[in-house]
Image: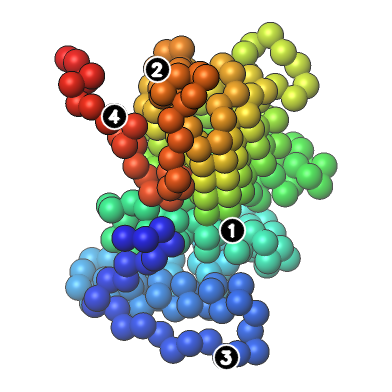
Amino acid sequence: MPAGELRYPSPVSCPQVPQATETPMEEDEAWVWAQIKAEARRDAELEPALASYLYSTILSHSSLERSLSFHLGNKLCSSTLLSTLLYDLFLNTFSSDPSLRAAAVADLRAARVRDPACVSFSHCLLNYKGFLACQAHRVAHKLWAQSRRPLALALHSRISDVFAVDIHPAAKIGKGILFDHATGVVIGETAVVGNNVSILHHVTLGGTGKACGDRHPKIGDGVLIGASATILGNVKIGEGAKIGAGSVVLIDVPPRTTAVGNPARLVGGKEKPSRHEECPGESMDHTSFISEWSDYII
């Protein structure tokens, strides 16, 4: 399947194209929201036990930002951090910043296209903790930028507690992000993650422990980072690079190359590393660097 091409579930009919007066971003958001509601109606009919849940989280809402705000508020609330307070916080933030809504739509599309286990947009919206953690982080990051740091840190703590995803509110995250499984992902304060990046579980984008200031990795667009990979320090992972599962990366990785191992080494060697043309963050190809299986020894 070409990158960017969506697979749509056949039981859900395609909604009508939005009016031409809308911007492309608004059209995309309206289309995805119509799909989500159609999927929720279908699932409520197929599984009546979920009808009330689907109505309260999706079908009773007039927009994606209202549904997402309601769901995040209920997920992240506590006895002292009320769901109504969080709902208002999320809704005000999403409603006032179209870029956050566009990023959420891009993340929904990323999960739907890249993850074979993602059966629908509504499944991602309701059940993918990586998606939910990322959207909540974007609100925390907005609060951090507005110097509302105590609230940003309180939200960061709840995200970590509930979703097992620890992203400092100052970290900058692009759009079209897939946190696949997401458990144990740690992203430090000065880290930057580009667009269309896919990160698997137990990945750490951390510091070396001895540096201050700008001390965390910078991840280029289209990068794929395999499970349990660790990238430490203010290093740059070039656009379209691939980091193998379990690798430990301490120096820069050039664009369109693959780094594997502990310590990580470039496939093909440092002087003339093998390069790939595809965007691994979108293709999710973890093993194409293994050209000869005879090299794979157990």
Q: Mark 2 or 4 closer to N-term?
A: 2
Check disc 4 and give the amino acid type.
Answer: Ile
**Left or right of residue 88: residue 162:** left
Q: Residue at x 41, y 58 (%)?
A: 3
- Give the residue pinned by disc 3: 19
Dividing the picture into quarters, in which one does residue 121 lie?
Answer: bottom left
Secondary structure beneath dot 2 equals loop
Dividing the picture into quarters, in which one does residue 237 lie?
Answer: top right
| Mark 3 neighbour class, 10 Å CA radius: few under 14, some 14 to 19, many 20 or more | few
- Residue extending farthest front: 272
Check disc 3 and give the amino acid type.
Answer: Gln
Q: Position of residue 69 (x, y in %)?
A: 56, 60
Q: CA separation, marks 1 and 3?
A: 22 Å
Secondary structure beneath dot 4 equals loop
- Give the residue pinned by disc 2: 261
Q: Position of residue 163 (x, y in %)?
A: 45, 39
Query: Which numbered tag is attached to residue 290?
Result: 4
Which mark is nearer the camera, 1 or 2? 2
Check disc 2 and give the amino acid type.
Answer: Gly
Q: Residue at x 43, y 30 (%)?
A: 274
